[in-house]
Structures are given as structure tokens and as C-alpha cells.
Image (tube, helix red, strand yellow):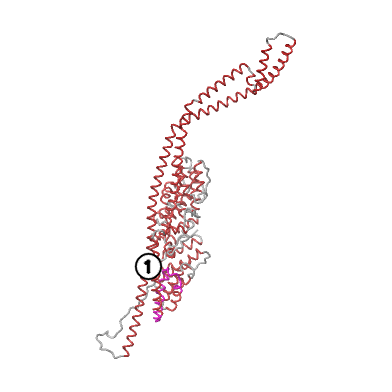
Amino acid sequence: MPACIRALLLAACAALLAAPASARRHDPEQMPSTRIRDLHYGDALFYYYQENKDLEALTRLLAYEHWGRLPHHEPEAQLLMGSLYLQLGMHNEAGELFERLLTDDVPTGVRNRAWFYLAQVWYARGYLDKADAALRKVNGRMSAELEARKELLFANVLMHEGRFDEAIRLLASWHGSAVWSAYARFNLGVALVRTQRVADAEAFLAGVGSMVADTPEMLALRDRADLALGFAYLQANQPAKALPPLERVRLNGPYSDKALLGTGWAHAALGDYQRALTPWMELRSRNLLDAAVQESYLAVPYAFGKLNANAQAADYYERAIESFTTEDGRLDDAIARIEKGDMLERVLAADARGDEGGPNGGWFWQLKDLPDAPESRYLYTVLAGHDFQEGLKNYRDMVFLQDRLARWGDSMEAFQDMIDTRDRAYAERVPRAQELLASGAVDRLQQRDVALQNELHDIVARHDVAALATDPERVQWARVQRVSAALSGVPDTPENAELHERLALVKGVLQLRLEDAWNARLWQAQRDLKDLDLALREAQSRWIRVQRALRSMPANTGEFATRVAALKARIGAIQSRLAATQKKQSAYLAQIAVHELGAQKERLADYQVQARFALASIYDRAANAQDAGEHARSPAPIQKGADAGQPAATPDVTPPPAPLPPPTPAPEPQR
């Protein structure tokens, strides 16, 4: 069912994107495509599509909705929240969202399927009135399979509400697949039995009880139908008609114990106690925890008594008393262990899917294994109860939430450590930052940048190629300038003239090199100054940000610290409330278990009383018979009164037949 709900809600979410007219034209059984327009909605879907990440997806959706991060997907997000609420068993919240969102603008098929699945959850949780209301919101017919399932679910709701006539009318015109038809016919037969119309129910229950079945589910349903029909005939005092369906029940099936007990009582009602012993003796070899087996411990000696085999009857009554006494002591021990309060911890620890990481996850998890403990042999009966199963799911969710809150509490501690570390770093760096800010280094660098810009402008204006030369070139140019200055004042002689020529040649070669590199060096200088200017602007920006951070850092840290402290306190309060609720739920489930085991003790005590009374009756009859023989061999005493000399009348103590519970409707097939 969870996968169906996912597909359904995604279809509804996509449908809400379209305009109303186009939504109505869309095929209600097909999932339209959608385009993610908000990044945060895609993030929530990322967790939604992962296995067992429903709580994370719901948490993110609620947070993003609170922060207004889903402007383009708000309707879809709401409907997706409804799906997640449904997944997590929060049916009331899901119902409120569906009531508000599943309007006429949503395709009919999508809307109908949403109400149908919500009705299934409410029916499973026992909210029959809400399930009834949700099913009545289905407008028109769905696909053939869903329509059949909806009608069958509606019939189950009506039967559990005691409205059997309405259920009969609904199921009488029901049509569906072979599997669903078997459940429908069974439930129709049960409804007829509940209204005392056993003859009308026979055709339906017998049809299901004699059908060809090849799966464990259908085999169990077939046995259940035969058992229901057989017990219905026993209740109607028609034991001969009860025998054929009871004898069709498999000997190794889940209903074999009750079928064997009913078969024995049917033979006994017909006066054939010899044949009644056969199924009852088989029952005595089975698990004493079963009520049918417990009653067989009384039925066997009862049959021997009817066959005048008083010795065997007395022997079996004594064995029954001994077995009941032993089992009663074990029940006391089991109750004492359950009342210690650690039963649920052992139950969840024994199951590998004890947290949300199970294959199904969420609310649809079911217990599969029991702990290896003395009381475990009694817990099978307790865990079979619907109330205990639903309560155990709630308790398991509380355990999961406690673990999650503990992790969130650890996160708050980590956040507080981060804030403390930030405060220490702030305290250590503030003096250095303030000293640097007071030094005026950025202002000096800016002044230096302006000076360099002006100097380069002068160099360009003077076309001073030597100013952009390399260090060796500047050294050479300076030497040329010194030699030229030295030669300027010497006499004009042939030797000096040669020196002037050589100097002019050197100077011309050097100047040619400088002129050749002028443009590239000028571009590089301008580029370096531009980079320096950008770096100074970045430094100035950072300088301003540092100044602002110095002013805002204490406020920001204080705000974060306040939020963390508030969240930490809130988590602690929720943990306290959850622990108290968890304790109450544990006590409630322990009370259910103790009540069930107490009912078993009362039944065993009642059977013990019957067995002791029947045994005393056998001994009393034997003693009276012996006294009567002795009186026959001795002179008769003087009689006084009309009843003198007659043995005391002893009642024929017989255990009553097993309680014949009325058959119950079968739920939908397991998928």
C-alpha cells in the first residue's frame, strides 16, 4: 500500500500544477509529468524518493514552507505533506490536508483514490466513522479493481458498525476479480450469519470453503469459511450439517484447532462420543495455550464418562487439573515479567526492523519476530490482537522519535560548541584587527598608488624610455650619461673625437633597445597598476567588511546562541513529554498483555473448577455405587421417609461446549 500511496499522491501533485480546465481533461488514471521550478522542492523530493526518508522529506517541506522557499509548488507541497502524513500514520493531519486540497480542480480519479487510501488507513486504525465518511467522498466509479476494493472495504466498515442489512445489500450486487470475489462472498456469508440467516449464508460460505486455492492466503480463507459455516450450524443446533464443512478444514492450517474441537462437539451432539474422541484426542497433543486445546482436556474425559469409562475419565480429569495448574504457574511468571516494564524493549530489539529502516518503514511496519523469553510463548496470542498491534506501532514511533530527538539534541550541543569557538576566535582576533584598522595601512597604500599613477603619467609625457628599462639597462644608461658628461668638457682632439663616436654608437644601440621594448613595458606597467588598483579596492572592501563584522559579530553570535538555547530547551521539553507518553503507552500495552494473560488464567481457573467438580462427581458416584453393593449384602436398616436408602443424586457434570464466536468479516487480501 505505501507504494500505491506514493504514486497516487505524486499524480495528484502533478495534477495541481495544471490549469483547472486542463486538469479536468487529463486522464485520471495516468500520472501527468511536472517540471521542478523550485530548488528546495526538488531537495524535498530527493529525500521522498529515497527508502525510509519520509520524516526527513516532511521536515524539509515544513521548513521550506515556513521560510517561503516553495513559491511555485505550494499546492503540490501541501498534498505531498498529506502523503507523508499518511505514510507516517498521522491520518488526522492527512485528512485535514486532503479535505482542503482535494477540490473539484483535481482530477476525479486522483481525488477518489486519495479518499480510498485514506479510508483504508482509518479502517485499519479503527476509525470506522471517518472511514465511512472518506468512502462516501468517492464520486463516481474508479477502475474496476479499485472499485471492487472500495465496495468490499465499505462492506467491512458497515459490518463492523453492525449495519449488516446494508452490507448484505452492498455485497449482493458486488462484482470483481476471483480473489476479491472470494473475500466478498465470505463477508456476505458472515453478514447473513450475523442476521441469523444461516440457510442463506450456506451457499456463500460453502462456495468459498470448497473453492480451488493455491496460495496460503486463499487456503486460509477457505478454512476460515468452512469454520464459520460449521460453527454457525452448531449455534443453530444442526450438528449434522456442521460436520462436512468442519471436516474440510486442513489439519495443519491456522484454524485446525477450532475445527477439531467443533467436529468433536458435533459428534457429541449426535450422541456418537466414540467418534468425538478422535478429534479431541488429537487436540490434547497440541499447544495448551490454545483455548480449543484447553477445552479438549475437559472434553476427552467428558466423552469417556458418557461411554461409562469412569476410570479413564477420572485419569484424564486428573491430568487436566495437573496441566492447568502447571500452566497457571507459568502464566503468573509471565505476568510478573511483563509487569517489570521491559517487555516492549525486548520485543523491538528482537525484531530487525525496530526502527524506520525497515523494508516498509513508517507506520506500515509490522512485528515479525518475538524475543527469546519465557513469556514469549504467550505473546503470540497477545500480539494477534488489533489493539496491541496498533499500540505497538505508536510505541515504536515514540522510540524512533526519542532517538531522533537525542540526535538533534547532540546537534544543538555541536552548534553551541561552534558558537563558543567563534566567540573565542573573535576575542583573539579583534585586537589584531583593531590594531590593523588603526594603522591606516590602506590609506597609505592608496596614496602610494596615486603617486605611481602620476609617475607613470610623467614618464609617458616625457617619453622617458630609460625609466621603464630593466636594472642592467638602467645601469648601462647611467654609465653612458656619466661618460657623456665627462666628454662634454674635454678638448676637441682626434682621440676625443673617436671617443665621442664610440659613445654615440653605444648610446644609440642602447636607446634602440629601450625604444623597441617601450610599448610592451608601458602596457605591462599600466596592467600592473590596474591590478594594484583592483587589489586596493578589494582590500578597502574587506577593510569595510571587517569594520562592519566587528560591529555585527557579537549581535549575530548572540542571536544564534539564543536560537540554539531555545531549540535545546524545546527539544528537552519534547523529550520529557515524549518520555511520559512513552511510559504511559508502555503501561497501556503491558496492561493489554496482562489482561489477555489474565483472561487465560481465568479460563484455566474455570476449567480447573469444572475438572475438579467432574472428578469429584465421578468419585462420588463410585463411592455411592460401592455403598449400594455393601447394603445389598447386609440386612436392610429401618427406612424412614420415601427417599431413604437411595443414593445421593449427583449431577451429570459435563463441560459446556466451546464458546462459538460468531464469524468475523475478512479484511482485504494481503498484497
x and y percentages locating residue 291 in the rendered image: 41, 69
Identify the image quadrant of residue 162.
bottom left
Does the magenta segment cover residue 303?
Answer: yes
Q: How many marks?
A: 1
Q: Residue at 37% x, 58% y: name it.
A: 588
User: Is any atom of residue 488 visible in this view?
Assistant: yes
Who is closer to the viewer here, 193 or 462?
462
x and y percentages locating residue 557 in the rendered image: 43, 37
Q: Residue at 49% x, 51% y: name it.
A: 52
Instruction: From the image, tell me which residue sits under label 1.
Output: 601
User: Is any atom of residue 188 visible in this view?
Assistant: no
Who is closer to the viewer here, 492 or 315?
492
User: Above or below — where is 487 with respect to 551?
Assistant: above
The amino acid at mark 1 is Lys
Does the magenta segment cover residue 241?
Answer: no
x and y percentages locating residue 318 in the rendered image: 39, 76
Q: For the view shown, which residue lies furthest in the left direction?
A: 640
Q: Residue at 46% x, 38% y: name it.
A: 422
- The chief SS type of the magenta part is helix
Identify the image quadrant of residue 190.
bottom left
x and y percentages locating residue 146 in the rendered image: 48, 55
User: Above or below — where is 599 with respect to 280?
Assistant: above
Judging from the image, what secondary structure is the residue with disc 1 in?
Answer: helix
- Magenta residues? 282-311
User: Above or below — where is 659 with respect to 146?
Assistant: below
- The crowd level at tag 1 (other Cα within 10 Å; few <14, some 14-19, many 20+) is many
